[in-house]
Image: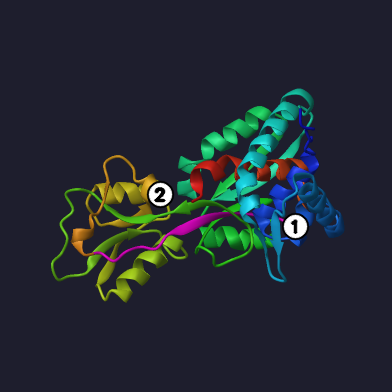
Amino acid sequence: MAHLRNLDIDLLRAFATVADVGGFTRAADLLLRRQSTLSLQIKRLEDALSHRLLERSSRRVRLTAEGEALLPHVRQMLDLNDRIVGRLNEPALAGNVRLGTPEDFATTHLPNVLARFAQAHPGVQLEVTCDLTLNLMTRFRRGDFDLVLVKREPERSDRGVRVWREPLVWVAAERLTFPGQGPLPLVLSPPPCVYRKRATDSLNAARRPWRIAYSCASLAGQHAAVKAGLGMTVLPKDMVPAGLAAIERREGLPDLHDTEIALLSARKLSAPARRLHEHIVRSLEDVGTA
């Protein structure tokens, strides 16, 4: 029988964290370790598996083919480890974690993720704030959040961990009649808003006239206005509510490029905040990235 090797959970966590943030400096901050220690842990894991897992460059660290294949299994092992430890030994994990998130994401994909975390760690109090991405970023820079989920252009930033990819679509009530010559009526959030900018930029590029028919920061208010036939809006493809429908391409509307959701973390995280960071990344990765 071949000799079996036991993998060290600390080494696996180091590998997954470096893969998440794309570099050793940020990963070392999150894990409260020296970069030299982290590099040594990755080397030990590579030696144990007899495969190179990361390609290091001056700007960014990238996964090798072997690293890409290993990462999902590492996440499963970390998730199982943390569930066992959380259930048996960590009822004492306590403190507050301040999380900022866009409203639409908070009302769809996030509740089940946070519910599972709360069940595993009843001593941790979550303070969740919903707002527009640019407002969240302003408050995050002020130090108001430990973690923040933000919408951003794909591949435009090395900061943070991508946890969700969002194909965007034009959405309207079925009875909405499109004007033949006049400007298209839009139902959007007031600035600053990623979806608003995406909608108006794409229409301007296509030289399609438009007007703001209804502006409301509330997601429920926007949905109600669109259902009433006041205009069309832009939503992620898998967040179109009942009673509304994605507009078919034959209507001549310009394509909308994808956006993505990234998770950013403060420089110094408490133990509960680090645990929530890991939980969100692992929970959303399986269903939200492509």
Residue 116 shown in magenta: no
Identified at 43% across, 55% down, the residue is: 217
Residue 254 shown in magenta: yes
Mark in front: 2 vs 1: 1
Q: Which mark is residue 158?
A: none
Which stretch appears magenta?
Answer: 253-267
Q: Local crowd at mark 2 within 10 Å, few (<14), some, or many (≥20)?
A: some
Identified at 86% across, 59% down, the residue is: 36
Identified at 46% across, 59% down, the residue is: 259
Coordinates of residue 9 in the picture (x, y in percent): 77, 38
Q: Which mark is residue 219?
A: 2
Judge left or right: residue 194 versus residue 64. Answer: left
Label 2 SS: helix
Where 119 sits versus 259, above or below? above
Q: CA distance from mark 2 to mark 1?
A: 31 Å
- Which comes sooner in the sequence, label 2 or label 1? 2
Coordinates of residue 173 in the picture (x, y in percent): 23, 49
Q: Is residue 20 visible?
A: yes
Where 199 sits versus 30, above or below? below
Coordinates of residue 101 in the picture (x, y in percent): 55, 50
The amino acid beneath tag 1 is Arg
Residue 203's quadrant in the figure? bottom left
Q: Which residue is mark 1?
A: 267
Residue at the top extreme of this rendering: 88
